[in-house]
Image (cartoon, rainbow, N blue to C red):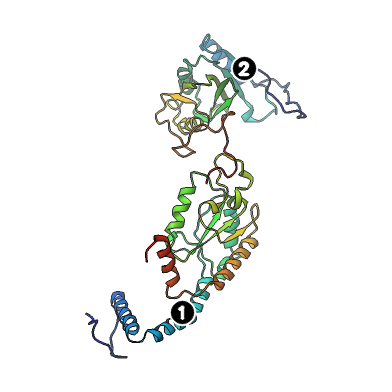
Amino acid sequence: MDLDPARDYAEGEGVLFTRSKELLLRAQNAIERSLVEAPIVSTYVRRLVNNSMGQILRVGQAASIWPLHLGIACCAIEMAAMGASRFDAERLGILFWSSPRQCDVLFINGTISRKFAPRLRMLYDQMAEPKWSMAVGNCAISGGPFFEGYNTVLGADQIIPVDVYVPGCPPRPEAMLFGLIKLQEKILMQRPDFLGTGIRQELARETGAQ
Amino acid sequence: MAAPMLPPGAPPLPVSTLPPAPECVELATRIESAWKGKVKSVRAMNPLNPGIQAEKNVFVAFESETGAMPAFWKWLRDKEKFDHCSVVVAIDHMDRIEVKHLLFSYTTHITVETSAMCDRMDPEMPSASLAWRGANWLEREQFDLMGVKFIDHPDLRRVLLPDDWIGHPLRKDYEFRQAGEWW
């Protein structure tokens, strides 16, 4: 079905949108038209949509944290215990996933060697926004017992931004769950960003675009 | 062999008075008769604990004349049924580097330890990976961390550290970076 951008489709006209391209085209037309016709109302509408739908989106994000299934060292054993039946992280919506493209949280659980550091950065870059990261265990926080090693990166925050630190050698599964709950609180406290304007502004600041 | 240096206050090393296993003594005499003049010293080690299969050890020292080592390894593999190179060790003695190959036989359960001394400035010695292909990565590790160059090694690259690493970090005079110096 071809859409006519100039035409104003009436409500309930029976238009069945099967392709996302057409839906996007229609939404873009509606937004542009509202900007031209009523800019002040449009701003209010945007704010209203952002504040109302953003809350729902934040709750959804906090209730479905998917960490990357990445085990570096012995803290990964505790991470496995956290996901297993006794502590059962999935009751909080925490599901381990094996592809960084669909993940929200990067669990850094172990010593980061200098050879692994570029790979970890690549994994973090492959994750889609919005994304968070957790440094689990003393190695990922500061190098831990391998602080004086010739091959140790002194903490994950030397490579990627870290949201939550969970100390311990290794931390117990309850501590990791507590860290994840703290991350949920952090997600719930974030400014609502339903329309993605914050991300767009951030990207513009990074790339220097107007 | 010089006595190993112990830190002050450490308990003395245990000295075994048990006799070595008879098959170790037989292997040592066979090595002595077959490799006379090429091997500096052969010794059947005294076991510390009786009745353990892994305690059947024979120590073979080549000192700095390492030319006969490939033939010796092939002789061990073909004639004495030593079918496993379990460990390759390099020790930094500050004036020389000692390289040890631990060779194990699954039929007789004897471990033969060959020892060679290398020059510390330019450590070179023959490679055991032509006799046992499993020694390939073990020798690459020693090249990576101690800088021992194994002649005739098929693929002598770094295995643990990144390729652009400078120096060999398990040498005793390796300069460590200070905390927070990089990154």
Quadrant where the image shows the N terminus of chain B: top right
Residue B43's disc is 2
Chain letter of mark 1 equals A
- Of residues A122 and A41, the one nearer the viewer is A41
Identity, as a three-letter code, of the amino acid under mark 1 = Asn
Q: Picture quarter containing residue A145?
A: top right
The picture places residue A92, in percent across and down from the top left corner, at: 57, 70
Taking A172 as reference, is A11 left or right? left
Mark 2 surroundings within 10 Å by alpha-carbon count, few (fewer than 14), some (14 through 19), many (20 or more)? many
Compare residues A8 and B102 and report the one nearer the observer.
A8
Using the image, determine if residue A109 lies above or below residue B60. below
Residue B8 in picture, x, y percent from top left: 75, 28
Name the chain under label 2. Answer: B
Q: Residue at x 57, y 56 (%)?
A: A135
Res. A168 image quadrant: bottom right
User: Is residue A144 toward the left or the right of residue A118 in the image?
Assistant: right
Give whichever of B157, B120 is nearer the camera: B120
Residue farthest along the top direction in this orientation: B37
Residue nearer the viewer, A197 or B40:
A197
SS under mark 2: strand
Q: Position of residue B167 (x, y in %)?
A: 50, 32
Q: Residue at x 29, y 83 (%)?
A: A16
Q: Which mark is residue B134?
A: none
The type of residue carrying mark 2 is Arg
> For residue A50, which numbered disc appears in the image?
1
The residues bearing labels 1 and 2 have C-alpha atoms spaced at a distance of: 82 Å
Q: From the viewer's perspective, is the residue at label 1 or at label 2 nearer? A: 1
Which residue is located at x 54 percent, y 13 percent?
A: B39
Image x and y of residue B82, in percent = 51, 25
Question: Can I make out residue A99 in this image?
Answer: no
